[in-house]
Amino acid sequence: MNKLLYAFLIFVCFGSVVGFTQEVKPASGSVSSAGSAAIPLPEIAFQKVFAELHVKGTFVLYDLNNDSYSVYDKERAEKAFLPASTFKILNSLIALETKVIKDQCETIEWDRRTWRFDEWNQDQTLQTAFRNSVVWAYQELARRIGKKQMQYWVDKADYGNRNISDQIDTFWLEGELLISARQQVEFLEKLYKNQLPFSKRNMDIVKEIMMIEQGGTYILRGKTGWAARVSPQIGWFVGWLETPNNVYFFALNIDIVNRKDVNARIDIAKRVLQVHDK
């Protein structure tokens, strides 16, 4: 079994450990048990992982088949923060739905400004802009969408607190738009199930550009984010793992105090999920 898949299934089986709670949602019908695995519990607890990396944060996991949440720091999981680049998921959906860009391959012309990341200093497509988290490209799309249409679709998607304030090209970076880890997971579940107010075609495109890694028995989709223009700075990693028999949605956010904490967004998830680079 692939290490990443194995690690996520370990996490799903993760029960009563320090700083960790599990909630089972009221059943809404028959829930399949497919995809469950008898895997030993990991030795390391959430609290130890966060302590070892000297960061403060939360981790929310939703097991679709078992209709259950596993939450570390339940109070913080309900606290709303700037979405930063995780908003690129919704921004992409809105850009496609409003036809300011036709698909994931249409070119977004480089603004000719010199940016600190080489990948930003060239023309982009929706796919490359998402993968490389190109801020200027998504700011251009937001300006094309405009405040009226942006607010309409943010409201329809019921995204976070739905407050896009006045700055159309920065509200997700330093504005008033806020979302919690729990809300991120709920939003992602709706996207996966095609329950958002967008065409299936556009949701399929966004799912495609969200792909991070694909193995023989899994697909990992997601987006990182870094709210670097506020204090304290917030780092995000949100997404879902598809397996043959189940889907696991997750959202992690942490306070970023120094540069090493930026890498901790992924490092914490890998340590908790027992994913180790070769």
Image (spheres, grey):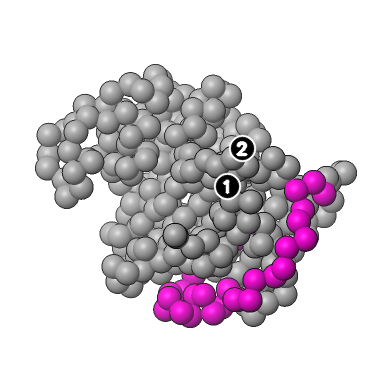
Image coordinates for residue 109, horizontal then vertical, percent: 21, 27
Does any portion of residue 124 appear in the rendered image? yes
Magenta segment: 33-61
Answer above or below: position of 63 versus 104.
below
240 vs 15, left or right, is left
Helix or strand or loop: what does disc 1 sit on? Answer: strand
Instruction: Indicate the quadrant containing the C terminus: top left, top right, bottom left or bottom right.
Output: bottom left
Image coordinates for residue 102, horizontal then vertical, percent: 39, 19
Q: Residue at coordinates 47% horizontally, 24% vertically from top-left?
A: 97
**Residue at the extreme right:** 30
Local packing at callout 1 (Cα closer than 10 Å; few below 14, some 14-19, many 20+) is many
261 vs 15, left or right, is left
Answer above or below: position of 252 versus 192.
below
Answer above or below: position of 267 versus 51.
above
* Magenta span contains residue 41: yes
Q: Mark 2 highlights which residue?
A: 192
Disc 1 + disc 2, Cβ < 8 Å:
yes
Q: Mark 1 highlights which residue?
A: 240
Local packing at callout 2 (Cα closer than 10 Å; few below 14, some 14-19, many 20+) is some
30 vs 259, left or right, is right
Q: Residue at coordinates 32% horizontally, 69% vertically from top-left?
A: 260
Q: Residue at coordinates 32% horizontally, 54% vertically from top-left?
A: 174
Three-letter code for the amino acid on which mark 1 is drawn:
Trp
Three-letter code for the amino acid on which mark 2 is drawn:
Tyr
- Residue 174 shows which numbered tag? none
Image coordinates for residue 16, horizontal then vertical, percent: 72, 75
State the residue in front, 101 or 247: 247
